Amino acid sequence: MRLSKSPPHRRPATVSLKPLTAVPVLSSPEFDAALTQGELSTALIAVFRGKFCDAILPNRKTTTFKKKEIIYDLGDKERTFFFLQNGFVKVGTITSDGHELIYDVRKGGDVVGELCASEPCRSDRAVALEETQAILVPFQDVMEAVRKQPELLARLVDVFCRALNEAYAQVNTLAVDDTVHRLGKVLLKLAGTIGERSGPEVVIPTYLTQEEIAQMVAVRRERISTALNFLRRRRIIWYTNHGHLVLNVRALEAHSAS
């Protein structure tokens, strides 16, 4: 199978993004739906790893995406999975009024685009945070592999059920937690998914702007700036010379639980 360097589904974004506002976005059913998708997406990637990758990825070519390049966008109908080999990718959506929401950051060894398994038209988008290489696998090939491994079907059903429970819990958390606590929980999630241990601390190994962090927490950038400074003053987080976040995970866990 031949994969071109410039697949037809990649194109510049046509949506004008607006700064996030707090309450209107959080109270929207559209936002709740985005959270549900985010939890489902995060849970699904665990299914498409390990032996599954070993069975489906050999002899397929790698495609390179430049920093800030859209890997796939809202409304795309090409049903393709992207198995990341290296780099970092943000996954999220854009609301009807132009607000971008980020619900996960993926790294090499993860999968993006897996929601095409449940719907033919994409309601999420993926953008490279830095130069990233991925192996593209058509939906039909993935489903054929699932049919050959029936145990994956049971895992998929379990993933869908757990993802819905986690999404509802996350909606409840967003409704009651203040910005600093919500930020702490997002940073702990990043530490668990893409973080790299450096002694007692964890480094987030890709540069995230305050705007991107705000899109993960779903508040205005100004509120995230204040929350980050609050955590920095308490030496719970700090930055490397390259602008990467360093987390004192134990202190962050204690603060988030308080």
Image (cartoon, rainbow, N blue to C red):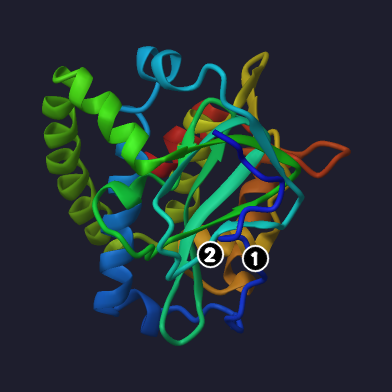
Q: Are marks 1 and 2 in contact (CB under 8 Å)?
A: yes
Q: Position of residue 91 (x, y in %)?
A: 50, 53
Amino acid type, callout 2 = Gln
Residue 126 vertical placement versus 18 (above, below): above
State the residue lying farthest toward the front: 1
Task: Give the number of the disc on residue 248.
Answer: none
* Total number of numbered discs in the rendering: 2
Q: Residue at x 14, y 20 (%)?
A: 150
Give the position of the C terminus as an image quadrant.
Answer: top left
Q: Position of residue 242 (x, y in %)?
A: 86, 40
Left or right: 75 in relation to 129: left
Residue 2: name its quadrant: top right
* Cα–Cα span, label 1 and label 2: 6 Å
Q: Residue at x 27, y 34 (%)?
A: 143
Amino acid type, callout 1 = Glu
Task: Give the number of the disc on residue 211.
Answer: 1
Viewer-side residue, 211 vs 131: 131
Q: Position of residue 65 (x, y in %)?
A: 71, 46
In the picture of the structure, the residue carrying the numbered disc 2 is: 215
Residue 173: in sight, yes or no? no
Q: Secondary structure at mark 2?
A: helix
Viewer-side residue, 19 vs 52: 52
Label 1 crowd (10 A; few <14 / some 14-19 / many >=20): some
Viewer-side residue, 83 vs 232: 83
Q: Residue at x 45, y 78 (%)?
A: 22
Residue 101 vertical placement versus 87 (above, below): below
Q: Residue at x 40, y 63 (%)?
A: 77
Q: Secondary structure at mark 1?
A: helix
State the residue lying farthest toward the right: 241
Label 2 crowd (10 A; few <14 / some 14-19 / many >=20): many
